[in-house]
Image: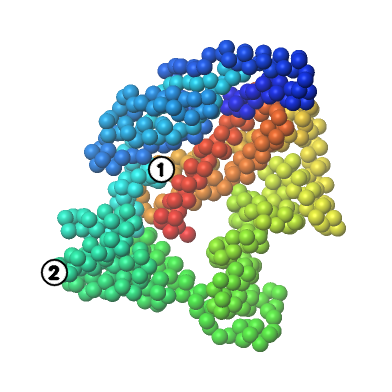
């Protein structure tokens, strides 16, 4: 079944209705409509089969891995028999095989799955078939994040570095801390505090419960009580203080803006575990924060000059950084100041710090087009054209008259041989700034290259037929996506990552590599999706003269709609979970 048949399946009926609307008294139109409806009524109403329907799903819901199944080690294939109505919604779902502990989750997932309508002789009909769900033990990062069952996620926390210390403590005292752990895992940190407080008030003098309560207080952002408890826990540890305890106290000091003490504790944690990347990263970030604070607070000639009303020189980036830092110190919510400081850092060659400042500006002001634009420049200079295009696109979305953003995005499209997309952007830039000679030159160069491509492609009618531009744009985009080896390699590495043995540094590195691969293909995927929409806005099928091109285009749009968002979510969760920088 073609992926897009459903969008044009009722053209005969629609045309008959339209003819009758234009001339209500036209007997021929009435007869035509009656004939169409009679023919449709005579068609079979249900298509039944035992075929596997996974590939026909518009959105295949992945089942939750039940907690009981995880504990018992249940796994394997579960088959669900489904009946689907004309709109593609599941009417009935019944398990026909598979482990009993897994059947309920599989039925629930099947019931929520959406399908493309089944078209028979121009009419949507009911259908039936089998959905197959494969439950595998969650050992990889994909398994962990694709499960939405909170208790499963909690069971997997032993694989995440920032939770390992907590689970080690709980394993030591399973009976006393079981209820507190369950509440903590559910996000009920206040409830966990009550449980640990009861243990402590009941006479337990063990350092573990103070540390557990400190962690719960930390989640509640009650940093003062968290600090009291972790200090008590350290005092009661009888000299056997763990790296995890020092790290937690360092985290608390960081939140309390006491950076020197945070650095001291992170150093102690690293002394105990000198080869642990997680602790190395904590110290690195704290030192960078301290350096930044020192730069913002140190009185110097440049800063005094700015305070006295004397502007910094055009290339005096230290002065600009100090001035922006002072503005931020006076108003931590000044997004414009972060953008200015990011610009100065970028000019000075510190692109990573510049990105951090642009990120903060965007966090404070999500509609700050300048922050997206400047961050795009940095990414482009770092050869991350995918992320740069995404940022330019966001800047343009926020400011439709942002001529430099159109020009810069067009340049990146041009480098990827996406001539039609480049020409569209350069044209927009020229229309906004008709006197800008650089924009004019960029457009002329692109049009000349475009002409050469057309001339060279004349023997290929599949490319340049009656809809030259749209076909050409599609070919360009498919060519750009033709070599996705880097994406597939990054995807394979990311999904194969074993959380039981991988270090946080390895997880972050792999996640960022996969993110960059996704960033690289997203602009072209989005561009093809736009063409797909254009076809149906014009009332046309998403088809080309060459069936191979049609098939590739359809599969790519389906990948954009169904697979790509899932991959994005996995990477985003991994980066967030580990605080990857």
- Please tell me in which quadrant of the rendered image residue 141 appears: top left
Q: In the image, residue 32 lies at what x, y percent?
A: 71, 15
Looking at the image, residue 347 lies above or below residue 35: below
- Please tell me in which quadrant of the rendered image residue 375 appears: bottom right
Please give left or right for residue 198 compared with residue 309 in the image.
left
Please give left or right for residue 466 compared with residue 317 in the image.
right
Residue depicted at x 48% and y 42%: 566
Looking at the image, residue 42 lies above or below residue 458: above
Secondary structure of residue under mark 1? helix
Count residues near mark 1 (Cα–Cα under 10 Å), then give few for <14, some for 14-19, many for 20+. Answer: some
Q: Nearer the viewer, residue 352 or 427?
A: 427
Count residues near mark 2 (Cα–Cα under 10 Å), then give few for <14, some for 14-19, many for 20+. Answer: few
Q: Which residue is mark 1?
A: 146
Please give left or right for residue 211 compared with residue 27 in the image.
left
The CA span between labels 1 and 2 is: 42 Å
Residue depicted at x 41% and y 56%: 578
Q: In the image, residue 272 lies at what x, y percent?
A: 28, 66
Point out the residue furthest to the left here: 203
**Marks 1 and 2, the one that precedes in the sequence:** 1
Q: In the image, residue 118 lies at what x, y percent?
A: 54, 22
Residue depicted at x 41% and y 43%: 146
Q: Which residue is mark 2?
A: 203
Please give left or right for residue 183 compared with residue 531 in the image.
left
Mark 1 or mark 2: which is in front?
Answer: 2
Residue depicted at x 41% and y 31%: 110
Task: Quadrant for the N terminus, please.
Answer: top right
Secondary structure of residue under mark 2? loop
- Please tell me in which quadrant of the rendered image residue 401 appears: bottom right
Q: Is residue 374 visible?
A: no
């Amino acid at each position: 079944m073609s992926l897009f048949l459903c969008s044009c399946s009722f053209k005969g009926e629609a045309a008959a209705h339209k003819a009758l609307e234009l001339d209500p008294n036209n007997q021929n139109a009435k007869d035509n409509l009656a004939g169409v409806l009679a023919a449709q009524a005579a068609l079979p109403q249900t298509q039944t089969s035992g075929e596997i329907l996974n590939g026909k799903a518009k959105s295949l819901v992945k089942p939750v891995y039940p907690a009981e199944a995880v504990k018992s080690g249940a796994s394997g294939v579960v088959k669900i028999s489904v009946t689907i109505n004309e709109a593609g919604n599941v009417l009935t779902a019944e398990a026909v095989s598979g482990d009993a502990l897994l059947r309920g989750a599989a039925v629930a997932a099947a019931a929520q799955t959406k399908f493309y309508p089944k078209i028979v002789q121009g009419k949507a009909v009911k259908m039936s078939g089998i959905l197959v769900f494969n439950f595998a033990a969650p050992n990889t990062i994909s398994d962990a994040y694709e499960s939405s069952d909170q208790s499963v996620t909690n069971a997997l926390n032993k694989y995440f570095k920032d939770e390992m210390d907590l689970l080690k403590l709980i394993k030591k005292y399973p009976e006393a801390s079981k209820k507190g752990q369950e509440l903590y895992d559910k996000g009920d940190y206040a409830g966990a505090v009550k449980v640990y407080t009861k243990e402590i008030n009941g006479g337990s003098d063990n350092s573990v419960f103070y540390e557990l309560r400190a962690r719960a207080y930390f989640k509640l952002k009650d940093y003062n009580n968290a600090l009291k408890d972790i200090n008590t826990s350290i005092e009661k540890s009888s000299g056997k203080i763990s790296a995890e305890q020092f790290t937690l106290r360092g985290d608390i000091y960081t939140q309390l803006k006491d950076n020197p003490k945070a650095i001291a504790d992170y150093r102690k944690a690293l002394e105990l575990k000198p080869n642990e990347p997680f602790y190395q990263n904590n110290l690195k970030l704290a030192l960078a924060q301290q350096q930044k604070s020192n730069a913002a607070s140190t009185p110097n000639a440049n800063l005094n000059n700015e305070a006295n009303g004397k502007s910094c020189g055009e290339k005096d980036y230290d002065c600009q950084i100090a001035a922006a830092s002072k503005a931020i110190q006076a108003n931590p919510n000044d997004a414009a100041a972060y953008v200015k400081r990011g610009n100065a850092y970028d000019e000075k060659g510190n692109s990573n710090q510049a990105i951090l400042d642009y990120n903060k500006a965007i966090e404070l002001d999500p509609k700050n087009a300048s922050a997206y634009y400047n961050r795009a420049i940095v990414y482009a200079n770092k050869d991350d054209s995918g992320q740069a295009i995404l940022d330019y696109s966001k800047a343009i979305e926020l400011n439709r008259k942002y001529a430099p953003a159109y020009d810069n995005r067009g340049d990146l499209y041009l480098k990827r041989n996406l001539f039609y997309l480049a020409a569209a952007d350069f044209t927009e830039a020229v229309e906004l700034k008709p006197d800008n000679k650089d924009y004019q030159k960029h457009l002329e160069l692109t049009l000349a290259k475009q002409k050469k491509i057309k001339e060279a492609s004349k023997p290929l009618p599949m490319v340049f037929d009656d809809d030259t531009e749209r076909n050409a744009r599609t070919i360009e985009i498919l060519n750009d996506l033709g070599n996705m080896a880097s994406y597939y390699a990054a995807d394979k590495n990311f999904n194969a990552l074993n959380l039981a043995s991988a270090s946080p540094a390895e997880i972050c590195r792999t996640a960022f590599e996969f993110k960059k691969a996704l960033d690289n293909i997203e602009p072209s995927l989005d561009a093809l999706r736009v063409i797909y929409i254009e076809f149906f806005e014009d009332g046309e099928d998403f088809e080309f003269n060459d069936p191979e091109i049609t098939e590739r285009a359809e599969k790519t749009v389906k990948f954009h709609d169904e697979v790509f968002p899932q991959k994005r979510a996995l990477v985003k969760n991994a980066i967030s979970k580990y605080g990857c920088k």
